[in-house]
Amino acid sequence: NAGVTQTPKFRVLKTGQSMTLLCAQDMNHEYMYWYRQDPGMGLRLIHYSVGEGTTAKGEVPDGYNVSRLKKQNFLLGLESAAPSQTSVYFCASSYRASGNTIYFGEGSWLTVV
Amino acid sequence: KNQVEQSPQSLIILEGKNCTLQCNYTVSPFSNLRWYKQDTGRGPVSLTIMTFSENTKSNGRYTATLDADTKQSSLHITASQLSDSASYICVVTEGNTDKLIFGTGTRLQVFP
């Protein structure tokens, strides 16, 4: 039972480089999310999706883009990485937003130098 | 402003002892409150979800309580084990938007 799988787990980028984080879930969930976690702060929502082909902005969307071409996958892209994007990124999924368990992936550690 | 505040920020206890973590929130309207456990270097794992009408919910040695009138929740851990060492995060769902508002967590360390 894989649940929510994120790749890569660790990555170091140079400022200005681009990269994509991949999230895959095998629970047939409609909702998928991307969060970032920084020291001393609660998880903050970057973007989310309520179904295949849909995306929406969260609390801190600037500098990120997402795509949900398949129901089981949710991609997070950084077009031009900045040191402020150094963080731990978590993907999550759920059947619906309210009242249902939200399952998180194991995290992706990104450092931008 | 909708906020979730947790206390203490960190806590050290001896194995076998009980402890209680606190969560106060100002989120309104309220939909539900969740507690998550996050081991170092891992993703958060759900412990409990409580709605407005639920006062107590247990998951093994973890018992969460909710007082929606005072907007307070607590997570009680009974007979702590070394594996309980982790961060515990309180999350409140805003009723109008289904937005999740995360606390910054309590870091618990259990020593033998």
Image (cartoon, coloured by chain):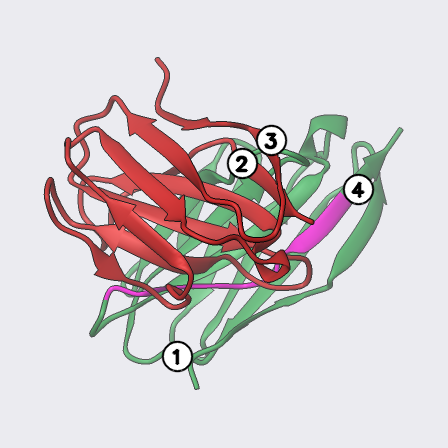
Q: Is residue A38 above or below residue A12?
A: below
- Asked if labels 3 and 1 share a chain, the reply is no
Nearer to us of marks 1 and 2 is: 2
The residue identified by callout 3 is: A10
* Chain holding disc 4: B
Task: Name the residue type under label 2.
Answer: Ser
Question: Which of pointers 4 and 1 lies earlier in the amino acid sequence?
Answer: 1
Nearer to us of marks 3 and 1 is: 3
The residue identified by callout 1 is: B69
Identify the residue shown where x is 35% and y is 13%. Answer: A1
Identify the residue shown where x is 68% and y is 58%. Answer: A39
Whole-angstrom CA distance, mark 3 to mark 4, is: 26 Å
* Residue A31: image location, x then y, percent: 21, 44
Magenta residue span? B98-108
* Residue B49: image location, x then y, percent: 36, 49
| Numbered disc 1: secondary structure | loop
Task: Name the residue type under label 4.
Answer: Gln
User: Can you tell which quarter of the image residue B55 is in?
Assistant: bottom left
Check contact, mark 1 vs mark 2: CB within 8 A: no
Check contact, mark 3 vs mark 2: CB within 8 A: yes
Task: Name the residue type under label 3.
Answer: Phe
The residue identified by callout 4 is: B109
The residue identified by callout 2 is: A108
- Asked if labels 1 and 2 share a chain, the reply is no
Whole-angstrom CA distance, mark 4 to mark 1, is: 31 Å
- Asked if labels 4 and 1 share a chain, the reply is yes
